[in-house]
Amino acid sequence: MKKLIVMALMLICMEGVFTGCAGSDDTSNDNYEGVATSEKTDADDNIENTETNGGKVTAETEDGAISGKVTKSEADGPKTIESTEITSFECWFSTADFTEPGSLGNHIYEMKASLDGDVVTGSYKVIDEGKEYEFTAGDEFDGGFMGELYTLIDSYNIAENNGFYENVSGIPEEFGAKINVDFESGEKIIANSNSDNYLNVDFMSELISLFERGVAKTPETLDFSVKSEFVMKEFGDNFGSITYPVYTFGYYTSDGELQQPDGYQDLAKAIDEINSEHAESADDAWNRFDTTSTGNIYNDTVSYVTRCDSKVVSFYERTKSIESDDQQNEYTKIQTYNFDSETGEKLGFSDVFKDIEYLGTLILSEFEKAYPDIDFVDDADSYISDSILYDDGEISFSLGQGCVHIFANEYAITCYPGSPHITLSYAANPGLVKAFYEKGAEEYLIPMDYDTTYWRSDSSIGFKMHCDFDAGSDSADWKVSFEGSDAEDYEESFFGYAPSCYLAHVNGRDFIYLRVPTGDVAMFTNVYELTSEGVTLCTDEPVSLAIYEQTLLDPESMSMSLDKIIYSMAGYMIPRTLYSIGEDGLPERRSDVYELDGTWVRLRQSGRYNPDNEKNAAVSGGMWNLVEGQRMRPYQTDMESYIDYITDDYRVVRFEINEFSYEMQLDSWGTLDDVFMSDEDDTFIGD
């Protein structure tokens, strides 16, 4: 008997407190009706008078005995099952006393499934953690959930345990295993032990995976966006700058009200806390800066959202900084965030990965493959394993679509600057993470990082983007290379900038949206499709749109800026509106109203100005009375007949226009430069 059980028995019976322990009916199996039992004689002083009572096995013990033990095996019972049609299934097992639990962990599991017609109703519990999930699924006997369950039971020959029963009275109810399977033919598999887990480890692991997949519903994309906050200060003849991300969970309506989905209050709170921490960290960075530096100093953080759905929100931040002249190399730091969307709780390695005791070896092996020219420290394997065990952030992860991102912080496992970054494919590493977290939203839009392998969700084909600048040239060479495929690399050159990129998965197809700068503010987009054969450009000409930096990461609700920028002496404006990605991968407009991003301006002339709607007209008495110098900014337009401005006290002024251009006439007031003058406290709102 295992050490834990022996210790439990000793505690129960120490100092003669108990003179005897009767067999517990709670650990018997009420479903043993129909399974034959064999008579058993006295085996030792602790096993007495074993008998059957209406199909229920009981045991009696002598006074002073530690416990009663009953072991029964149906020698002539069926060890093979003819039927393949399971109607109900129940399994309970414990790995609480496993010394090397692997992916199972030290837990107590319970799984149930029953078939009613063609609908499966099931449940999955991790009892010691208080986690319980329920699910329903359609099914047919030749496939589906019950079909997979039968294949699993048959391949591990679970029927060979039929009729096995073992009961040790007086021990804690946290060991052993039991299984009960009913078939359409009336055949059964019933086995039970309250002290020893007799089930095959691989069977239990695959059974858990099957039920996790049953529970794991396809999550939906959440409204989530990121903007970069940039601040610059002058230090003598030089400058210092700080850039950090600001996250918005939900979306803002046209009147500036934040709308958030119901049921995600804890997630919203967690995101708010991150934003507060970033603002405080920016203040700390200013204090660290050496203001006597002769060169420019900076602390720049860029965020990459890898998932944002109703199950998981994951993103990572890469900070690069030089804060004094004494700093020889740019310092790189990685911070990852993984949240259970439903609870708002942070997810650690032990929450997500199945087999963390072997994960360190896998990660180091992949790092060595990805960085063959870098020497890793001698104890890198144990360092990675310890970091995973204690979740100290030196080795970190971010859940992605079809893969998981893994990072090592600078100098954590190497003696070189920079942060090593790999991705592990789910398809190439089956069983890497729990099924709850493996499946992402079916349709998604995520910002892409350079020199990072992304994996198609349903295959082991990976692709990576690179961007190199030729010395003495104004061009940037953009390239896509492939892993696990014979597809040819794709190369293209762009003027002077590294394009920002988004990966969109819609209608089972993968597209890259490449946002290409062409000047100070002008942008266009190239759309490419990714297939197993390589990269294909979807249009003959670039799309005269660009994904707005703060767009929602949802392919059904992308905000895109038009390449129709209006300049005037007073300022400039850029129209944008909502698009979805169509079946051909190209953007399709969803709205006739265009929001306007642009500079603040001031009215040149006092007067009575038109409100934008009947409600505001009623409030204003028919017209807004505005005075010279009134501050406002461009707000929205239909690009044909009107343009709205909004004041700093949120009054919306509507001008009728004859066209949308620099020369457009605003009512009878004149052109843009006739109506507005520049605002000295100029603040650009937008991209």
Image (spheres, rainbow, N blue to C red):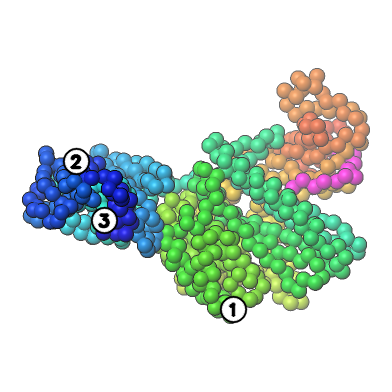
N-terminal of the two: label 1 or label 2?
A: 2
Give residue 217's position: percent from left, percent from top: 42, 46
Please say whether residue 137 is one of the residues in the magenta stretch: no
Under mark 1, the amino acid is Ile
- Stretch in magenta: 670-687
Q: Which residue is mark 2?
A: 30
The residue sitting at 90% across, 30% down in the picture is 627
Q: Nearer the viewer, residue 591 or 325?
A: 325
Q: How far from the left and from the top, in percent, is residue 94?
A: 32, 52
Q: Which residue is mark 1?
A: 374
- Quick one: label 3 or label 1, which is nearer the N terminus? 3
| Residue marked by disc 3 | 196
**Tag 3 near tag 1, CB within 8 Å:** no
Of residues 682 and 80, the one drawn nearer to the viewer in this rendering:
80
Q: Is residue 680 one of those drawn in magenta?
A: yes
Residue at 24 percent across and 38 percent down: it is 117
Give the prevailing secondary structure in the magenta stretch.
loop
Secondary structure of the residue carrying numbered label 1: loop
